[in-house]
Image (tube, helix red, strand yellow):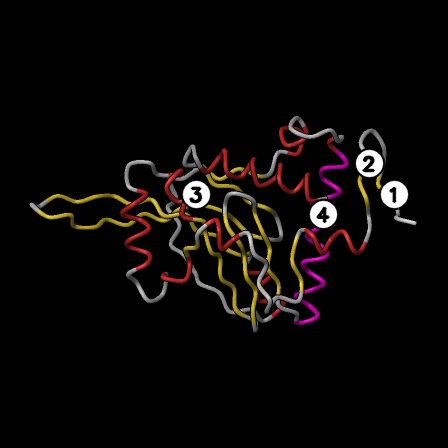
Amino acid sequence: VVKIWDSVSAFIESYMKQSKGIIIPGFGTFSFIHKRIDVGNNKFLLLQRPVFAISEKFAQTHGLKFTCYAVNGSIPVHPLNYSSIQTNTTYKRDQVEQCVKHVLQVFNRSIAGQRNVEFTFSHIGKLHIRNGKVKMKFFKDFISAVDENAGKHIIENMCNRPYTCDSVMSDRDGARPSTSSNVVLPRSALLSVPEVKAGGCFSHNS
């Protein structure tokens, strides 16, 4: 489960490095918002900041509080491509799709049970659902990677704003699971079966 989800994260990361968004149906969308900042001498810098917009239907169903983003309509948004993700794993396409659905089901059940959740996307960041509030924290290295020219300015801009200062985290901080989270995904999905075996189907642990 963890290995497959790492490949899912790598797929999302590769598209965002091309300034493309990714939608995970029923869950949310990774995309960008643009912001122009004054750098002096009548010069402006266009920042492309990554954002995660949770599915409004999902949030409303569970009564979650979330931030609405004015996502740039010119940014192409693509669905997860299970066949493409599968090429970076030892598993079949159907296994990859089933694994993604399983992890999202565990996420759904956890939120429905009003539990705090920490959902890790390798090399991208962590999605926190805590006390009914949604917060995506991106790794600094990822922010720099998706906009090599303005990455430093994006991080500074986010850190200096009260509403986005907690949306940035170092990879070192990201390596430690939060003690206030009841559910840590995708690892917690391992506890509710199923185990994926290369070349086979999902099987229940004995």
Q: Which residue is mark 2?
A: 197
Residue at the spot of label 3 = 142
Residue 103 in magenta stretch: yes
How far apart, in angstroms, are the residues tagged by discs 3 and 1?
35 Å
- The nearer-to-camera label among 2 and 4 is 2
- Which is closer to the viewer, label 4 or label 3? 3
- Gap in angstroms between the C-alphas marked 4 and 3: 25 Å
Lower sequence index among marks 3 and 2: 3
Residue at position x 61%, y 48% in the image: 25
Say if 206 sits above or below 148 in the image: below
Q: Where does label 4 land, which residue?
A: 101
Horizontal side, residue 54 vs residue 149: left or right: right
Span highlighted in magenta in the image? 94-114
Q: CA distance from mark 2 to mark 1?
A: 8 Å
Asked whether residue 164 is drawn in magenta, I would say no
Q: Residues within 10 Å of mark 3 (few under 14, many from 20)?
A: many
Label disc, if present, on residue 149 of the rendered structure = none
Q: Are marks 3 and 2 in contact (CB under 8 Å)?
A: no
Mark 1 sits on what residue? 203
- The disc labelled 3 sits on which kind of residue? Phe
What's the amino acid at mark 2? Lys
Q: How many marks?
A: 4
Give the x, y percent position of residue 97.
Answer: 72, 39
Quadrant assignment, res 41: top left
